[in-house]
Image (tube, rainbow, N blue to C red):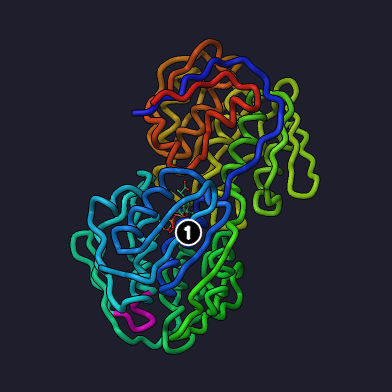
Amino acid sequence: MSKLVVKGGATLSGSVRVQGAKNSALPILAASIISGGESVIHNCPDISDVDDALEILRYLGCRARRDGTKVTVDSSELARTDIPEELMCRMRGSVLFLGALVARAGEAKISAPGGCRLGPRPVDLHLRALRAIGIDASENEGSVRCRCAEYRGGLVYLPIPSVGATENAMAAASRARGTTVIVNAAREPEICDLACYLSKLGVRVFGAGSSTVTIEGRKTLNKAAEHRLIPDRIAAATYLCCAAAAGGKAELRNVCVLDICPVIRALREMGCEISRRRDSLTIVSKGKLRAHGGIVTGPYPAFPTDAQPPLMAASVLAEGSSVFTETVFEKRYRHVPELIKLGADIEVEGKRALVRGVNSLRGCELKAEDLRGGAALATAALRAEGETVISGFEYVKRGYEGFGRTLSELGAQVVEID
Ligand code: EPZ
């Protein structure tokens, strides 16, 4: 059990480097089994979700090693095509091995993936996508079995632009006999990053980042690929919210500004000054924040659902009221009762949360229930009077590399306790 102890009141100052993208690392590490060669992945974050992905790779018979932020995977030896519940249950990203296993070996057997409890997280769109390109995919009580030695590719229509289903379809389509077109594909930057990696394996991918992605499958792929992951846009958004909440001035290096425009816009509405110099952002937060004009989360390029909890945490002390509308996940307000324990005034009704700004927060014992919700509790605790102890901090370590260290480097008084 991990805890984060936060002594509130310190304003932030300093400069930190933002990690590589967790939600790029997971699909690309899964796709590294497709070619049967050696992939070198740079800028790979040191987080427990990546550790779990490496454990799955080793279980499948690959050699996987980490050297700082460089991860090397040799998938020449694939000993099995099944992933047991004990490995699948740790994160949602484990489902991304499905398409890659079918592409490599023509079969796959996985149990239900884990992941943050944000409401139902079915895999029906993943199966729909695989079936649409000729793969025999069946599900029984959460377990999924696929088998198809040869499949032709085809037209995949996603009624929801699911990130994971798009990624599984792209991985499977890379070894299809023909061309696959994904309509209503997810447009997140991590989709483009996966497409860039697949192209280094020799797969021709067109339209990544748009709603229509075309993949020309190839039977034989390049054996080796080297790739640098994009920066983690949600980590960057989270640290911006921390600086906004705590006050002060902070520089974030290694940021892709275009990926977090909606978050920057909201924080500027709240009175923060945010400036850019190449791939660095500097945020200045002075005095009391103002309530933003309301945010509605949605598929990229809308406001990212993963940044909703940290922005809400930065809003609880703002002047005025702000409305959050969460349209992606059904239960993404699990951080609200914990923020209320700190003294926040938040009312949730269905998809909407109304945050009325209060004048102060008082530190206390809190419990993280999921990855981004845990980061939100830390964000609010930076401004709470006294000490806040956040248990369940292992959730945060799934997605943030050195979260406590990063905040300490910016002058926050935080300590991680294992
Ligand atoms: C990815 O999850 C991310 N995770 C999530 O980040 C992110 O919040 C989400 O995309 C949306 O951007 C990873 O990349 C590992 P979806 P994913 O499929 O792929 C429904 C974080 O904190 N749906 O785009 O699971 C689903 O229930 C995590 O880093 C189906 O109905 O998200 C949701 O309502 C949290 N059937 C919506 O689609 C399916 O088969 C979007 O989900 C799949 C999804």
Q: Is residue 57 above or below residue 120?
A: below
Q: What residue is at 65 percent from the left and 27 percent from the top?
A: 410
Looking at the rendering, the quadrant in which ligand 1 lies is bottom left
22 on left or right of 247: left
- The magenta span reads 130-135
230 on left or right of 176: right
Q: Which residue is mark 1?
A: 72
Q: Amino acid at mark 1?
A: Thr
Q: What residue is at 32 percent from the left and 80 percent from the top?
A: 135
Of residues 241 and 172, the one nearer the viewer is 172
Does the stretch in magenta take in 134? yes
Instruction: Quarter of the image for the N terminus: give it.
Output: top left
Residue 219 placement (x, y as % from top left): 43, 86
Residue 294 placement (x, y as % from top left): 62, 40
Instruction: Quarter of the image for the C terminus: give it.
Output: top left
Q: Is residue 238 above or below residue 154?
A: above
